[in-house]
C-alpha cells in the first residue's frame, strides 16, 4: 500500500517480553499476517535463536542458509537474507541456531547495540517498500533484545493473562528507559496486548483489571483469547488467519491490527 504522503521507511516494532511462553511469537506472526492481509508490506525479523517464527511460517531449516545472524554479524544484504512467505506481502528474515552465539559475539563489538538498527537502514530496504517491520525477540533482556529496541520505533509487549503476568514488567520498562537514555531517545511503547485471555476465568479478568489500572491506556482494548486454533496453526506452518480464517483468534489479531493502525493514524496527525 504505497502512500506518497507517508514518511520514508517502515514503522519498526519490537515484540518483547523477557518471559517465555507469553505469546510473543504468536503475536508477531499473526499481527504481521493481519497487516499483510490489509495490503501492507511487512517484514518479520526472527531474532530468537529458537527460530519459532521461522518454523511457524514454514521456512525449512535447509532454507535458512542466510539468517538474521548474517544481517547482524556478517554484513549481509537484506536481499540475500529475507524470504517471501506463503502470506502475500509478508517476508521474513529467518533465524537459525547461529543466533544462539550472537549475544556473546556481540559483547566485544563497539557497535554491539546498533547492529540490527544499521541492518534495517541499509539502502536496500527501500526497494522492498516495507510499511512495517515486526521483530520477534528472544525471551530475555539480552543484547539481542537491546538491538531490537535500538532498531525500533516502538515496543509491543504481549502480556499473558495469567498469574504473575505483571511481574517482570518493571524490569522490561527499565530496559526500555535505559535504551531511551543511551541509544534511542524516541523509543515509544506501542502498547501492551493481553494474550491467552479466557473470559470464563476469573484470573484472566483480574489480570486485565490490574493491567488496565496500573498501565492505563497503553493496554490495547483488543485482547487475544485463548483459542486452540491459534496454537494449532504453527504446526501447519501458517498464521491462524490462514489456517482458520474465521476463528476467534484470527478475528482478534485483525482487531489488534486495526487498533494499532488507528493509533498510528492519530499519532501521525499529532506529528
Ligand atoms: P513466546 O514467543 O512468548 O515464547 P509463543 O507465542 O511461542 O510465546 O506462545 C507460547 C505457547 O502458547 C505456544 O505453544 C503457542 O501456540 C501458545 N499460544 C499463544 N497464544 C495462544 C492463544 N491465543 N491461544 C492458545 N494458545 C496460544
Ligand atoms: Mg517466541
Image: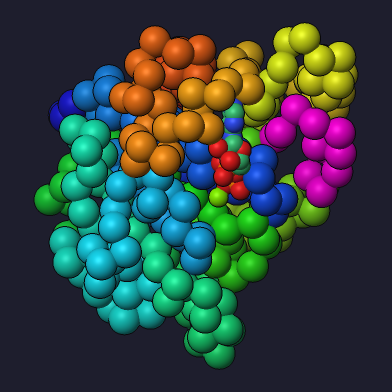
**On screen, residue 92 above or below 108:** above
Residue, far bottom: 108
- Percent coordinates x, y for residue 262 in the rendering: 45, 16
Foreground residue, 105 or 130? 105
- Percent coordinates x, y for residue 37 in the rendering: 27, 23
Residue 10 is at least partly visible in this image: no
Give the left or right position of residue 171, taking residue 90 as reference: right
Give the left or right position of residue 214, taking residue 9 as reference: right
Quarter in which the C terminus is drawn: top left
Residue 227 falls inside the magenta stretch: no
> In percent of the image, x 40 and y 45: which residue is there?
56
Range shown magenta = 159-169
Foreground residue, 59 or 214? 59
Location of residue 239 (image quadrant): top left
> In percent of the image, x 24 and y 34: which residue is there?
87
Foreground residue, 114 or 266? 114
> In percent of the image, x 86 and y 14: which residue is there?
202
Q: Main secondary structure of the magenta part?
A: loop
- Percent coordinates x, y for residue 30 in the rendering: 42, 31
Give the left or right position of residue 25, taking residue 131 as reference: right
Residue, far left: 127
Which quadrant of the picture is home to ligand 1?
A: top right
**On screen, residue 147 above or below 217:** below
Give the left or right position of residue 239, taking residue 125 as reference: right
Location of residue 164 (image quadrant): top right
Location of residue 218 (image quadrant): top right
Residue 162 falls inside the magenta stretch: yes
- Percent coordinates x, y for residue 79 in the rendering: 16, 61
Quarter in which the N terminus is drawn: top left
Residue 169 is at least partly visible in this image: yes
Amino acid at each position: 500500500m504505497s502512500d506518497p504522503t507517508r514518511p520514508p521507511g517502515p514503522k519498526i516494532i519490537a515484540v518483547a517480553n523477557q518471559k517465555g511462553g507469553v505469546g510473543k511469537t504468536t503475536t508477531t506472526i499473526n499481527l504481521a499476517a493481519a497487516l499483510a492481509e490489509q495490503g501492507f508490506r511487512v517484514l518479520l525479523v526472527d531474532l530468537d535463536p529458537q527460530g519459532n517464527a521461522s518454523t511457524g511460517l514454514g521456512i525449512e531449516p535447509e532454507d535458512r542458509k542466510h539468517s538474521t545472524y548474517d544481517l547482524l554479524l556478517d554484513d549481509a544484504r537484506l536481499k540475500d537474507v529475507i524470504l517471501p512467505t506463503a502470506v502475500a506481502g509478508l517476508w521474513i528474515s529467518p533465524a537459525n541456531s547461529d543466533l544462539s552465539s550472537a549475544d556473546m559475539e556481540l559483547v566485544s563489538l563497539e557497535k554491539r547495540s546498533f547492529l540490527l538498527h544499521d541492518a534495517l537502514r541499509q539502502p536496500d530496504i527501500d526497494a522492498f517498500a516495507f510499511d512495517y517491520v515486526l521483530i520477534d525477540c528472544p525471551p530475555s533482556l539480552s543484547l539481542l533484545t537491546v538491538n531490537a529496541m535500538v532498531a525500533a520505533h516502538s515496543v509491543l509487549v504481549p502480556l499473558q493473562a495469567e498469574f504473575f503476568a505483571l511481574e517482570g514488567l518493571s524490569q522490561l520498562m527499565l530496559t526500555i528507559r535505559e535504551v531511551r537514555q543511551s541509544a534511542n531517545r524516541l523509543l515509544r511503547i506501542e502498547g501492551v496486548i493481553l494474550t491467552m485471555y479466557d473470559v470464563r476465568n476469573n484470573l484472566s479478568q483480574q489480570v486485565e483489571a490490574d493491567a488496565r489500572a496500573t498501565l492505563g491506556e497503553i493496554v490495547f482494548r483488543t485482547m487475544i483469547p485463548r483459542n486452540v486454533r491459534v496454537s494449532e496453526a504453527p504446526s501447519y506452518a501458517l498464521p491462524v488467519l490462514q489456517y482458520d480464517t474465521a476463528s476467534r483468534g484470527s478475528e482478534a489479531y485483525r482487531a489488534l491490527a486495526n487498533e494499532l493502525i488507528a493509533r498510528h493514524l492519530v499519532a501521525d496527525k499529532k506529528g
